[in-house]
Amino acid sequence: MGAGRDHPAGVALLPLPVSVPQGAGRRRSFSWRPALLTATLLVIATAATAQTESPGQTLKRVEQDLQTDKALQRQLDRQSQTLQKELDELRDRLVGLADQERAQEDELAHLEESLTALETQERNQAEKLEGERQQIAALLAALQRVARIPPEAALARPDGPVDTLRSALLLRDTVPALRARADALAQALTRLAETRETLQAQRSRTYAARLTLIDRQKEIGQLVARREELSRQTEEERQQVAQRTARLTGQAADLRQLMDRIEAERRAAAAMAAKREAERLEAERREAERRLAEQRAAEQRLAEQRLAEQKLAEQKLAEQKLAEQKAAEQRAAEQKLADQRASEQRAKAEAETARAAPSPPAGERLPVGGRVTVRYGEADRYGATSRGVTIQARAGSTVVSPQAGTIVFAGPFRGYGQILIVEHSHGYHSLIAGFGRIDTAVGRRVATGEPIGLMPADGSPDLYFELRRHGQPINPQRGFGAPEGKGQG
């Protein structure tokens, strides 16, 4: 029996250097080159001294190798925790950036409305000034014609004295009025110049806000890509840790078998030297077997006890689930009865109340910013009663999770396009449709306000948001804290 043949392969135990992200753009590396060199030298030393060292020396060396592998396992565990912490910090940063983008979209919409009003005001002032200018030009032309007539010619005109006096009085009254209108025209021109300056400044602010919004959307896109990369890297690291743990467990068993074989060889050699030693070793072997049998019997009793406890726990869990199912059925029956008693007049009053509220209640978060075009309980564009809300958003806007939960469906579904279903606590589910792109996957945990996708990049896209509790649709604008049975359709 050769020690080099029975010793576990040391190279398989050595982990590769893994880079751990630190911050948004830096990386920190854990270097295990000293451990790699030590383990390699141990493998070479094993092949060189396998035929010369004693069984006790071999056993001691194998135990040292096992301790080294356990230290490497602890380093892998700490690395996985560091990756998960950075992933959580990145998710929190994405939530903050999504809120900033929502605020910038609202500011841009306000600036665009103000810009439209200023442009309308400029056109109205310009048209009014053009009319005043034409009237004043006509009066000035008349005065110029009268001023060209000499006094002698005026006295020699065939008109009577009364007509001549009337013309003089008319000219005397016209000159102050014309001067006043000219002053008013000058003031109007000044106001028009100020309006145009304000309009130019407003256009500059609007252009700057649009550039800031584009930069914010690019930064969110980069962070979303970084989040996906960290998620994949964390999963790969966890798989590596699991594989290393399995290998270490198997190698520990191999080391135990090696020690048993070395002890058996030692007993066989002693038996060949003396018969008394052989009898003593046989007695020791029988004693070991007796103890092993007792240990196995104890383990069997412990396994039976654990199995009984497990069955009892499963029975209690089944009873609890049955009670919960009965309670859920009872609540569903009560809810159905309450819905049947609800009248159409109450539904109309609720729709009018919802229509009178221009924005969702405080503390409630819609998946995307924009204008609500169809509210809960209103007729949609197909004439059917809407069981959710439809939001007209800006092209390319970021869509966020309205509440923390787990993604249970993501992708195309029949004629609804790209949809996403998020499972929340307390029986809530969110159904969101109208994505241009989905940036998450099934099974992924998302935080409140975390970006989960983008709206289509062109036109004025619509996002459909439906909120359900225990399978029944409720008014999304009442929020997750609405009492049960209120606002259901």
Image: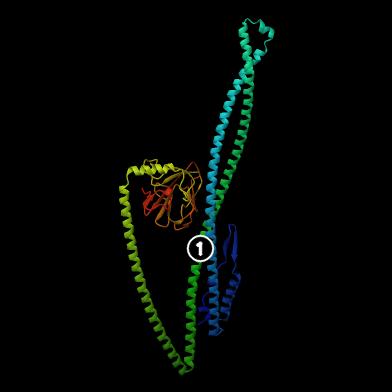
Of residue 282 and residue 364, the one placed in the foreground of this image is 364
Left or right of 266 in this view: 416: left
Give residue 381's position: percent from left, percent from top: 40, 40
On the picture, is 149 further left or further right than 230? right
Q: Is residue 68 visible?
A: yes
Say whether residue 102 is left or right of residue 428.
Answer: right
Mark 1 element type:
helix
Residue neighbourhood size for the residue with mark 1, other residues' Cα within 10 Å, grouped as few (<14), some (14–19), many (≥20): few
Q: How many marks?
A: 1
- Residue 15 in percent (x, y) is at 55, 69
Q: Is residue 401 left or right of residue 42?
A: left
Rendered position, 66 above or below 453? below
* Residue under pointer 1: 236
| Residue in view at x 33 percent, y 58 percent | 328
**Colouring style:** rainbow
Q: Which of 282 and 312 is in front in this view?
A: 312
Q: Up-down: is 396 above or below 408? A: above
Q: Position of residue 389 (x, y in %)?
A: 42, 46
Residue depicted at x 38% and y 81%: 297
What residue is drawn where x is 47% and y is 74%?
250
Q: Which of these two is toward me, 86 or 283?
A: 86
Above or below 434: residue 193: above
Q: Position of residue 398 (x, y in %)?
A: 51, 49
Residue 384 visible to the viewer? no
What amino acid is labelled 1 in the image?
Answer: Glu
